[in-house]
Image (cartoon, grey):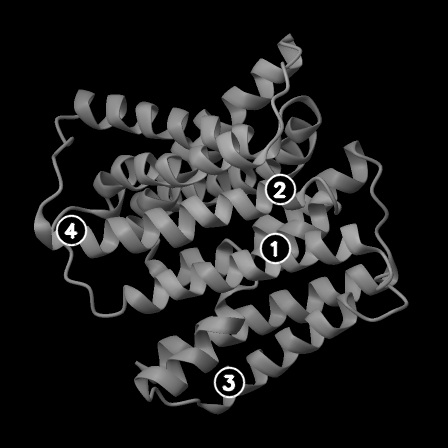
């Protein structure tokens, strides 16, 4: 396979990953109307784990993790998947999907300053400008003209998405310098199983018992969430990183919130306000600069 062909395949994988994750947010927003959010989250990550196990087994790549893999399983399984999906699924009860996706993707804005404070990494000009732009975008989204600060539900939903992004950053910081034994894709099923063990107890203890009304729509949402939005998305991103590199993939994934917002506006009737659009430009621009600046500082 030529380098040009490999690059084209990588771009296809990246585009597929962008849409699989971008469409996931409207799917989550619709799914929690049928099923309590933590139950939806638990089913999604468990189904994703089973599908990845089957795919890896068919390819002869399914392996048990070793002691060296445990930091990656624990940090990603607990923070990046278990707690993250529990928070963002619950947030979909209170805020629009597009807004949730934008806040949920703000992770690099929290990673950059934390890496400087904790690991003494250099804050170059590009990263600094990116952080300022991104935080300015968050300020736009949280200004009183856009967010009703007297609405407790709105504050809870927005706060959950920001907290989820911060927890994701904790996992990324913990993984700095990790020496990989199994590949990220091979670790995926085990991380998703751990995420299930995190979200399921919350679903049992916190949410009120409610018999779901099973329908074709609910099954379609559940299958998309587990098969496409989780297992297929992880596979696409792993393949994209392999062919295009982590930097290109990271910047490309900024298309996810754009897909989420566009889909939510077109099909869920969510409003694309001036402040949401401004916040989108500032946050995604800031994340792009942070990502590119981090690459230059390495």
Which residue is identified by label 3?
Answer: 126
Which badge, 2 or 1, comes first in the chain's sequence?
2
Which residue is identified by label 2?
Answer: 90
| Residue 256, image x, y percentages | 58, 49
| Residue 113, image x, y percentages | 47, 81
Which residue is identified by label 1?
Answer: 161
Please tell me whether mark 4 sits on a helix, a strand or a loop. Answer: helix
Real-space Cα distance between discs 4 and 2? Answer: 30 Å
Which badge, 1 or 4, comes first in the chain's sequence?
4
Which badge, 2 or 3, comes first in the chain's sequence?
2
Determine crowd level at label 3: few under 14, some 14-19, many 20+ residues with C-alpha closer than 10 A: some
Where residue 206 sits, quadrant-wise, is: top right
Real-space Cα distance between discs 1 and 4? Answer: 28 Å
Real-space Cα distance between discs 2 and 1? Answer: 9 Å
Are the two marked residues, 2 and 3, in contact with CB atoms closer than 8 angstroms? Answer: no
| Residue 269, image x, y percentages | 84, 37
The one of 244 and 166 positioned closer to us in this rendering? 166
Quarter of the figure with the N terminus:
top left
Residue at 32% over, 58% down: 245
Which badge, 1 or 3, comes first in the chain's sequence?
3
Please tell me whether mark 2 sits on a helix, a strand or a loop. Answer: helix
Which badge, 4 or 2, comes first in the chain's sequence?
4
Between tags 4 and 2, which lies in front?
2
Real-space Cα distance between discs 4 and 3? Answer: 33 Å
Which residue is identified by label 4?
Answer: 69
Question: Is 243 left, or right, of 269 in this rendering?
Answer: left
Which badge, 4 or 3, comes first in the chain's sequence?
4
Does residue 265 lie above or below 258 as drawn? above
Residue at 49% over, 75% down: 290
Does residue 288 lie above or below 63 as drawn? below
The answer to whether residue 228 shows anywhere in this view is no
């Amino acid at each position: 396979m030529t380098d040009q062909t490999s690059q084209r395949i990588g771009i296809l994988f990246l585009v597929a990953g962008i849409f699989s994750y971008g469409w996931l947010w409207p799917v989550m927003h619709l799914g929690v109307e049928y099923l309590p959010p933590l139950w939806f989250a638990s089913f999604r990550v468990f189904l994703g784990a089973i599908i990845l196990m089957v795919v890896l087994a068919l390819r002869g790549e399914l392996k048990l993790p070793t002691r060296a893999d445990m930091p990656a399983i624990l940090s990603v399984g607990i923070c990046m998947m278990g707690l993250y999906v529990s928070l963002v699924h619950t947030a979909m009860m209170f805020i629009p999907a597009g807004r949730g996706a934008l806040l949920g993707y703000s992770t690099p804005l929290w990673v950059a300053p934390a890496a400087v404070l904790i690991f003494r990494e250099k804050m170059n000009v590009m990263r600094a400008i990116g952080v300022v732009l991104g935080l300015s975008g968050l300020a736009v989204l949280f200004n009183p003209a856009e967010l009703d600060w007297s609405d407790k539900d709105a504050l809870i939903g927005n706060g959950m998405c920001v907290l989820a992004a911060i927890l994701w950053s904790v996992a990324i910081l913990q993984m700095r310098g990790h020496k990989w034994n199994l590949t990220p894709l091979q670790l995926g099923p085990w991380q998703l199983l751990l995420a299930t063990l995190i979200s399921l107890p919350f679903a049992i203890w916190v949410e009120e018992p409610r018999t779901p009304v099973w329908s074709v729509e609910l099954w379609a949402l559940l299958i998309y969430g587990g098969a496409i939005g989780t297992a297929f998305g992880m596979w696409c991103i792993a393949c994209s990183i392999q062919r295009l590199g982590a930097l290109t993939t990271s910047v490309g994934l900024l298309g996810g919130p754009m897909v989420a917002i566009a889909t939510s506006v077109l099909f869920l009737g969510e409003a694309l306000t001036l402040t949401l659009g401004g916040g989108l430009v500032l946050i995604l621009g800031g994340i792009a600069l942070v990502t590119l600046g981090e690459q230059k500082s390495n």
